[in-house]
Image (cartoon, rainbow, N blue to C red):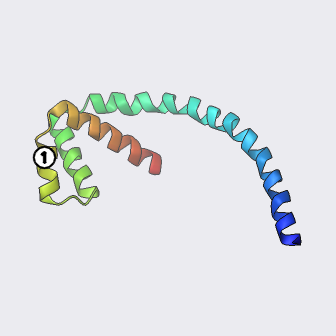
Amino acid sequence: RDRITSFRKSGVKREKPLIQHPIDSQASISELPVAQPIVDERCMNLSEKEVMDLFEKMMEDMNLNEERKAPLRDKDLSTKREMVVQYISATAKSV
């Protein structure tokens, strides 16, 4: 019973940091849009060849087989560019 009681007490203590998290997340969210346009700007200036090269690398990183790659390759360039932008921003965040 002491363990259960201590669990309940620690649960109450955990609520206090949760109140602070929205403040922390707002600060980090406000920082993200500053970095994001830089990535988008660079990606929008990519040549068609660069987009295609990055698109192929993205599919390799996703470990897609040829059967899965074929329909993606049929997409138009603007769709591929958007996918590459998302891929670059995701890999930039993970580094």
- Residue occupying the far front of the picture: 1
Residue 44 occupies which quadrant of the picture? top left
Q: Position of residue 82 (x, y in %)?
A: 28, 34
Residue 63 occupies which quadrant of the picture? bottom left
Q: Quadrant of the N terminus?
A: bottom right
Q: Can you identify the residue that label 1 sits on?
A: 71
Residue at 33%, 44% (x, y): give it.
Answer: 87
SS at badge 1: helix
Residue at 16%, 45% (x, y): give it.
Answer: 72
Q: Which residue is nearer to you in this view: 4 or 78?
A: 4
Left or right of residue 7: residue 74: left
2 w.r.t. 56: above or below: below
Left or right of residue 74: residue 6: right
Residue at 46%, 51% (x, y): give it.
Answer: 94
Q: Position of residue 85 (x, y in %)?
A: 32, 37
Left or right of residue 59: residue 6: right
Q: Which residue is nearer to you in this view: 76 or 46?
A: 76
Residue at 15%, 52% (x, y): give it.
Answer: 69
Q: Position of residue 64 (x, y in %)?
A: 21, 58
Q: Position of residue 19 (x, y in %)?
A: 75, 39
> Which amino acid type corresponds to the residue marked 1 in the rendered image?
Pro
Q: Residues within 10 Å of mark 1 (few under 14, many from 20)?
A: few
